Amino acid sequence: MKLRFILPALFLTLPLTTYAQDTTSQAQMQTTANPPICLIEGTPSAEHYKSIKRIKAAKGTYGGFEEVKPKLAIVARKYGADVVINYHQSQRFGFWPWRIVRPVLTGTAVKWNTPVDCTALGGKQIY
């Protein structure tokens, strides 16, 4: 009879203790593991960077661009980029074009040769 109550109690409290342990270092991990990505609308001189890949991030339904920018940063980090050049944002038709227009962000992920000063390049940082 006791076993019937002890096992469910253990299964319910175990995830709570694991979550409590992980949240203490989450703020530190986020700043070191997720460096900011610089968005530049134009194309700077090619001697300053190495082009990696064209990337795109989109939201499945109607919404604003600010909701999609973290997704674009995640995609850029996945390829090892620290800058996105030729950055463009637009509203495009989705699967049902007569109903839904969705935000789409595109650009080219690049690795900058020197430390990046986003404001000097005329860009905007996203996290």
Image: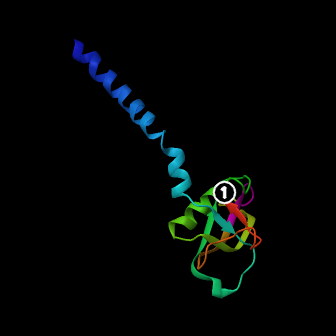
Locate residue 41: give its quadrant. bottom right
Image position of 121 with respect to 96: above or below? below
- Which residue is found at the position 62% from the left and 61% from the top? 36
Q: Which quadrant would residue 88 be assigned to in this image?
A: bottom right
Question: Does residue 26 appear in the picture of this structure?
Answer: yes
Give the quadrant of the C terminus. bottom right
Point 51% across, 66% down: residue: 78
Q: Secondary structure at mark 1?
A: loop
Figure check: 91 above or below 108: above
In this rendering, would 1 be left or right of 62?
A: left
Q: Which residue is mark 1?
A: 68
| Location of residue 93 by image quarter | bottom right
Task: Tell me where residue 100 appears, x and y as whole percent.
Answer: 72, 55
Q: Is residue 93 left or right of residue 24?
A: right
**Three-letter residue code for mark 1:** Val
Is residue 104 inside the magenta stretch? yes
101 vs 83, nearest the viewer: 83
Q: From this viewpoint, which residue is outermost toward the top?
A: 1
The span picked out in magenta is: 97-105
Q: Position of residue 32 (x, y in %)?
A: 52, 56
Q: Nearer the viewer, residue 103 or 108?
A: 108
